[in-house]
Image (cartoon, helix red, strand yellow):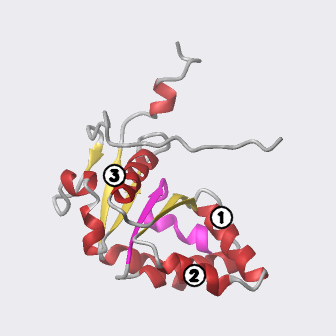
Amino acid sequence: MKELIKDVIKTFHGYSFDHIEIPTSIPIDDLKTAKLLERKENLILYGPVGTGKTHMATAIGVEACNQGKKVRFNRTSALVNDLNDAKTAGNLGKMLKQLSKLDLLICDEWGYIPLDRQGAQLLFQVVADCYEKRSIIITTNLEFSKWNGIFYDEKLTSAIIDRLIHHSHLLVFGGQSYRLTHSTIRK
């Protein structure tokens, strides 16, 4: 028997912005309405584990889907695995073409798992292809200065950061882990 796994759909209903530093360059309404996609802007959601980054990224993605936009949500490591598999199977061009049709690419847990050299190069290719053509949302708990530990190449790391931050807003998440504070173990 095949088991079906469904992701939990997250929206902005009841979402709290209390512990998030949001730059003045992007109104909260532009997040809630996914308006930043019209301008091909990126978001980098940075902060500790459990502070609402993935929830926000998902909620923006859901809103974009509700507007008829094409969205893909991936754990970054899963996207890189898919890219590696496509390259091995000779289907990389096909996968890159599919990604080029998106309005929004969400890369969750950026930097949680180190990449091999080929994976880092393929991820760079995706980021470079997105530049000024579609929006990317990245969730991460690593500051930029530590990204070289993901990509192992200073030039590649610099090139990725350069393309991502040009049309980007950095939201800094703080506070306690939601999962930890609402854990049944703590009750």
Name the quadrant of the N terminus: top right
Query: What label sits on residue 172 in the rendered view?
Result: 3
Residue 97: image x %, image y %?
A: 55, 83
In the depicted view, which residue is nearer to us: 30 or 152? 30
Residue found 62% across the figure and 76% down from its top: 120
Q: Which residue is drawn at 72% across and 82% down?
A: 87
Residue that mark 1 sits on = 114
Mark 1 or 2, nearer chain start:
2
- Are discs 3 and 1 less than 8 Å apart at CB? no
Residue 131's place in the image compared with 3, above or below, is below
Kindly identify the amino acid type of the residue bearing the numbered disc 1: Pro
Q: Of residues 95 and 183, which is closer to you in this image?
A: 95
Measured from the top left, where is residue 154 in percent x and y? 54, 81
Residue 66 point in image, percent of width and height: 35, 55
Residue 96: which disc? 2
Q: How far apart are marks 3 and 1 (CA)?
A: 22 Å
- The three-letter code of the residue at mark 3 reads Val
Q: Residue 145: within the magenta?
A: yes
- Tell whether label 3 touches label 2 (CB within 8 Å): no
Label 3 residue SS = strand
Q: Residue 74 carries which label?
A: none
When the figure is inspected, residue 80 is found, relative to residue 45, above or below; the finding is below
Q: Which of marks 3 and 1 is nearer the N terminus?
A: 1
Q: Which of marks 2 and 3 is nearer the N terminus?
A: 2
Mark 2 residue type = Leu
